[in-house]
Image (spheres, rainbow, N blue to C red):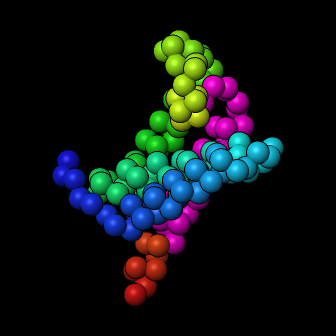
Amino acid sequence: MNLKFNTLYFTFAVLLFGIEILIAKFAHDPIIRPYVGDVLVSILIYCFVKSFLPTPVLPTALCVLLFSYTIEVMQYFHIVNRLGLQNSKTASTVIGTSFECIDLVAYTVGIAIVLYLEKVSTNRKHQS
């Protein structure tokens, strides 16, 4: 597979990463941090992948969703502790430390948003 840099996806990834940082630092509420952050992180990962790989939308979205699910399942098995990273705030934040089924829903919503936006974008390109 050839790498091909896509400025638009990379810009979205950087913006979403900035939003995620703001959420992590300043949102200490029961909705934004745990749920909106998880929705946005799946979109962020998708945009980051598409920044470098010109892969088809659906397989990329499904791979990102599977990756997100895998991370969540690893939280169920306390992977941070098993790796000896329980004292690392970065590892705990990036990987997460607690499994919640609702997080799987949030990742799915994020990928659904991606698929919707990609479809709208494709339709606009074809109409132009």
Residue 26 in view of the camera: yes
Please tell me whether residue 114 belongs to the stretch shown in magenta: yes
Q: Nearer the viewer, residue 80 or 42?
A: 80
Q: How many marks?
A: 0
Q: Residue furthest left?
A: 2
Q: Nearer the viewer, residue 67 or 97?
A: 97
Q: Nearer the viewer, residue 42 or 10?
A: 10
Q: Position of residue 96 (x, y in %)?
A: 60, 30
In the image: residue 94, left or right of residue 25: left
Q: Position of residue 15 (x, y in %)?
A: 50, 62
Please tell me whether residue 107 belongs to the stretch shown in magenta: yes
What residue is rendered at 70% in x and 30% in y?
Answer: 100
Q: Which residues are magenta?
A: 95-120
Residue 95 in view of the camera: no
Q: Residue furthest right?
A: 30
User: Could you tell me what secondary structure mostly forms the magenta stretch?
Assistant: helix
Relative to 15, residue 48 above or below: above
In the image: residue 121, left or right of residue 50: right
Relative to 43, residue 81 above or below: above
What residue is rendered at 30% in x and 54% in y?
Answer: 52
What residue is rendered at 57% in x and 15% in y?
Answer: 81
In the image: residue 9, left or right of residue 41: left
Q: Residue furthest bottom?
A: 128
Quadrant of the snapshot with the C terminus: bottom left
What residue is rendered at 35% in x and 57% in y?
Answer: 51
Q: Position of residue 108 (x, y in %)?
A: 61, 46
Relative to 18, residue 80 above or below: above
Q: Position of residue 124 (x, y in %)?
A: 46, 80
